[in-house]
Image (tube, grey):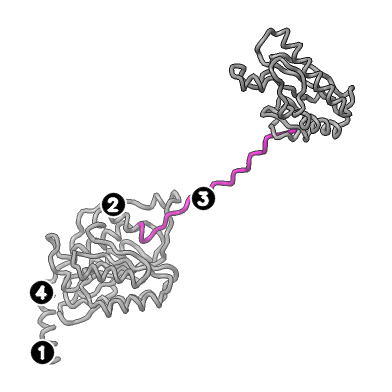
Amino acid sequence: MSKKIFGAFCVAALMAFFAGCAAAPTPSDFEALDLYPKIETGQLAPKVDNFLVILDGSNSMTDSYKGQKKFNQAWNLAYRLNETIPEIPLVGALRTFGTTPCPFREFTELLYGVAAYTPEGFEGGLKSIKTPGGVSPLYLALNAAAEDLNATQGPIALIIFSDFIQNEEVTLQAVENLKNQYSGRICIYPVLIGNNAHGKNLQERIVQTAGCGFAAAGDEIFTNAGMAGFVESVFLATVSAPAPPPVAPSAAPLDSDGDGVPDDLDKCPGTPKCATVNEVGCWVIEGINFDFDKANIKPEYTANLNQVAECFKQYPDIMFEIQGHTDSIGQAAYNQKLSERRANAVMEYFIAQGAARDRLKAVGYGATDPVASNDTDEGRAQNRRVQINVIR
């Protein structure tokens, strides 16, 4: 086509365009969810300082999707985005591409910003858009966006509303250029209008190339809850709850005599550190139990008794009570005498090993202080014992 013919065609198209020029789409009913309370209460915090919206106004967006032009859905999504963004400090911008009556002209236009974001300013940019048309140079809008954002500082969110029926090679190269220019600062969020398979594939490849952002479906974020979720994910970050203050470790239970039994459970305080104690802190001569109705010390007990005698020598200033015990079988009076015989037998053994008599006292307790059940043979055997208590 010659330049004269092309020019005449575009002039004719332009005249027809203005003759039947349509106003911007009318916003559909929408009530934005308020995200600001979550910011006030510290649940959310801003994560971007800048955002730029690219709105596809090319000829393919005049196609019908679910009973309306795809462009109308894209425009309404941009409108709902503007209504939902909470009051946080932002630099904002709105750019479109297409929106020209000349079907062969590549065209992009900055309609708002780059400026301190206000909902009114952004809405004014949206309402200045007229009728979509022309070819689909998303790459041209992306390249222009790179220039738009040149003076910004901090993280950037780039949101694209499009059907992504584009030239893949040049589009992805433009995304790569943006990524390199704003390394670590920019995330791209392509929102698919319609359900074109080619468009969905390019949408996903844009995210992969950008390395930051996510793909969204226009249908899914059209509701107030869907848009609130989208805005929250793009503009805000969840604030981690502060770690609870460290809990001071509980003070170790006091164990004054160091026998491993806390004072509040120790029934025999003051036992020497060389003593072998039971679960209530009483010094039991380990392995020393008597046969039924017997008070004699068996030869196999002597090694344990010798250990106790050595322990006595380490504490020459302490006086010890040698306590004899029985099981519950038999008369109480008889058991009392039997327990005394057992205590005396052990005390005499210690004296024979060199312990001073005036440091030892033998006492019988009969069956009054069992350490196990008297209902079983095993329990009764444990009760036929001798244990040691510190007197002073």
Residue with the mark numbered 2: 225
Q: In front: 316, or 111?
A: 316
Residue with the mark numbered 1: 5
Give above or below for 140 relative to 304: below
Residue with the mark numbered 3: 242
Query: Badge 1: how crowded within 10 Å, few (<14), some, or many (20+)?
Result: few
Badges 4 and 3: C-beta atoms under 8 Å apart? no
Q: Secondary structure at mark 1?
A: helix
Position of 282 compared to 2: left or right?
right
Q: Earlier in the sequence, mark 1 or mark 4?
A: 1
Residue with the mark numbered 4: 19
Q: Magenta includes 90?
A: no
- Place residue 257 in its image quadrant: top right
**Residue 263 horizontal/vertical position (percent):** 71, 30
Position of 182 compared to 253: left or right?
left
- Place residue 341 in its image quadrant: top right
Looking at the image, which residue is at 48% across and 50% down?
241
The boundaries of the magenta stretch are: 232-256
Task: Say what amino acid the circle numbered 1 marks.
Answer: Ile
Task: Say what amino acid the circle numbered 3 marks.
Answer: Pro
Task: Say what amino acid the circle numbered 4 marks.
Answer: Ala
